[in-house]
Image: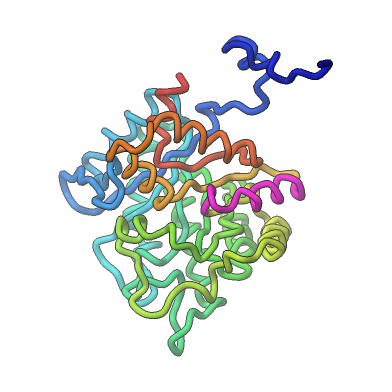
Amino acid sequence: MNHRPRRLRKNAAIRSLVREKELNISDLICPVFVTEEKNIKREIPSMPGQFHFSLDRLGEEINEIVEPGIKAILLFGLPEYKDEIGSSAYSKNGIVRQAVGLIKEKHPDLFVITDVCLCQYTSHGHCGIIDDNSVDNDKSVEILAKVALSHAQAGADMVAPSDMMDGRVGAIRKTLDKNNFEDVSIMSYSAKYASAFYGPFRGAVNSAPSFGDRKTYQMDPANSGEAVKEAGLDLQEGADILMVKPAMAYMDIIYRFKQDFNVPIAAYNVSGEYSMIKAASLAGYLDEKQVVMEAMTGIKRAGADLIITYFAKELAKWLS
């Protein structure tokens, strides 16, 4: 036979030499949950191995993230106070603002991305402002721009709007530029699907909606052309990075983004995807390291330049 592809699989050395895609520590973004409580490092029941950290213990987690070479985090805040408009999300003493300040004081070179949304800050658990029992898009966008600005003022390097309101990227870009934060970039949750894979996360941040669901603003899992439209609009409005969420069930969307747009593509390996693998590995059904490496390689092969994953610390150790 003239064609024997197995020749290039003969041993580990040749497999490594011809490997098309390879994970790197620099691909990884590690999510971090910070709470306004005191002296807290509390494991999240639905996400084994993931923790809530209070401000006075946040440094422990940041040190563990930085030590193996991870260069970026995605920060989520758990506020003490919630109201109808999520005012604690942009308060001068807000949990994310405080956390950003502490992190930048100790680790100025760590790239800090902040999640910009209202769900964990509102008493009703929706990602925007409620008017007549529905989420008011334009009122929500005004608040979201205030949240992004407050994070930039605290020292965030990038803001990541995850709400899926129409026009929010443009409003945030305009607000940041007006206030001399032209260098603060935007990673848009461009294709955030109305997914059942978010379940463990909603428990982690106590953000389940108190009525209805999020299907009127998050995307229908059956749609792909709509995702491309959303991404194109976000780019027009000033997004620097486009994100697909979830990752593993939406690799076709990652691929389409990579083919259609000449910008960095991020993929969020979400809580449900993480917890399924964790549960199966803890039960002895599969080898966690091998499965995680395969899954993350698949996400990168689909076209992701950046991977947000709760496995980031483990991956960094395996890759170093």
Query: Residue 247 in the image: x percent, y percent?
Result: 54, 49
For this view, does 257 lie left or right of residue 2? left
* Residue 107 pos. (x, y %): 39, 31
From the viewer's side, name the closer residue of 181 and 120. 120
Q: Is residue 119 left or right of residue 283?
A: right
Res 302 quadrant in image: top right
Taking depth in this image into account, of 20 and 49 the one nearest to the observer is 20
Does 226 sit above or below residue 253? Answer: below
Q: Locate residue 122, reporting x and y percent.
A: 35, 71
Residue that lies at the very extreme toward the front in this rendered image: 1
* Front position in the image: 164 or 191: 191
Residue 88 lies in the magenta stretch: no
Residue at the far left in the pictured view: 39
Q: How many marks?
A: 0
* Residue for point 49% across, 57% down: 149
Q: Main secondary structure of the magenta part?
A: helix
In the image, taking residue 99 as reference, residue 55 lies left or right, namely: left
